[in-house]
Image: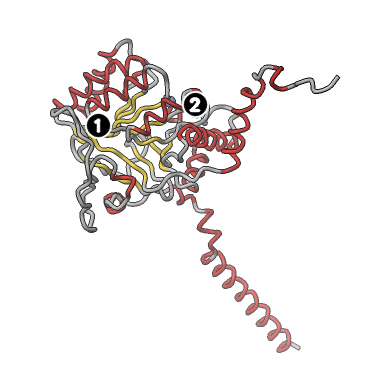
Amino acid sequence: MRNALGALGLLVASVATACVVTAVWFWTSSPRLEVAVPATISAPPPERLPATAAATSAAARDDVEVTAALSEKPPVPPQPKTACANPDALGVSRVVEVDTTGGPGFGFEHFKQLDFLTDKEVVLTFDDGPWPVNTPSVLKTLADECTKAVFFPIGKHATYHPEILRQVAAAGHTVGAHTWSHANLNGKNFTEQQARDEIEKGFSAVKLALGAAPAPFFRFPQLQHRPDAMTYLGSRDVAIFSCDVDSFDFKAKDATQVINSVLTKLEKSGKGIILMHDFQKHTAEALPALLRRLKAGGYKVVQMKAKAPLQTLAEYDEALVKEIKLPVASTRPVGSVVQTVSQ
Ligand SMILES: [Zn+2]
């Protein structure tokens, strides 16, 4: 009896061991475990950026030569360049192509992993447009200096002024998105779903305005990096842009303050992504002199482009089309809607 009990005990112990081993194997090998790990938002290691910035994309070849260094691939054959009428223009010193897989973060104010700029290199970024007068003025200044920037338009503004946003894209600038309504996604009572809706609707609005998908580049309003929204952006392969130099141009009393703010901060950081607003009058006024000062100071502009456009979600694209068409339909005169055909 004791032997029988012993054998039974051994059997139970063996089964238990087998279960534990199986469970451990399951959890360590299950692909679901990888999805659950928040590493989906982790940025690729720094050395990946130059490699992925390889000069292979047709999208990166429009008017400036892709000069991303450290590529082991053959150099791009010379591309026809758009003539720059200004021989002393600031220009674009190199174009980098960003592989947004996993949602890499840029801008040392919040993300320190991807240090791809060398000394004196800057990236120009403009938020909150498109807006009449100011955005076209910014575009003219950038064109006069033969240089390129990244724009983060607000979805609503894109639906108000799609023709201005199309001018931004047509000029060869990179266009990402900056939510639908510029809501603070970290705001009180703001749900995770509402944050996703703001992000997706913003991208769909930019796509609707442009007639083409934007770059998977996103900037949080007020740089309020909501953690679950960052994880979500990672799962959508959208790069997140903070900045290195925050101009605080929206607080500037005049153009001179914008210029001084940018140059003072840039002197300290030596390089970096500069955050400005094409929405702001003082920024538009400051830009010609600011770009001259950057040129005189030996700064060089790097343009960031995406390796592939964002795949917007059909449900948001469709909902937005319906939402925008609604007021248009309601403004039709009654005579064109209801006609008496027999009495
Ligand atoms: Zn903004």
**Image quarter in which the C terminus is found:** top right
Name the mark nearer the viewer: 1 or 2: 1
Q: Secondary structure at mark 2?
A: loop
Q: Is residue 119 left or right of residue 149?
A: left
Q: Is residue 8 left or right of residue 217?
A: right
Above/below status of 253 relative to 187: above
* Residue 120: quadrant of the picture: top left
Q: Nearer the viewer, residue 21 or 94?
A: 94
* Residue 106: quadrant of the picture: top left
As drawn, which residue projects farthest toward the right? 343
Q: Amino acid at mark 2?
A: His
Above/below status of 306 relative to 11: above
* Residue 342: quadrant of the picture: top right
The image's mark for residue 182 is: 2
- What distance separates the C-alpha of mark 1 from that of mark 2? 27 Å
Q: Residues within 10 Å of mark 2 (few under 14, many from 20)?
A: some
In the rendered image, residue 154, in percent from the top left (x then y), is placed at 47, 28
The image's mark for residue 56 is: none
Label 1, on which residue?
A: 147
**Image quarter in which the N terminus is found:** bottom right
In the rendered image, residue 288, in percent from the top left (x then y), is placed at 24, 20
The image quadrant where one finds ligand 1 is top left
Q: Earlier in the sequence, mark 1 or mark 2?
A: 1
Res. 183 in view: no
- Confirm if mark 2 falls within 8 A of ligand 1: yes
Q: Nearer the viewer, residue 13 or 91?
A: 91
In the rendered image, residue 281, in percent from the top left (x then y), is placed at 35, 15
Res. 258 in view: yes
Q: Amino acid at mark 1?
A: Thr
As drawn, which residue projects farthest toward the top? 253
For the point 69% across and 20% down, the residue is: 336
Colour scheme of the rendered structure: secondary structure
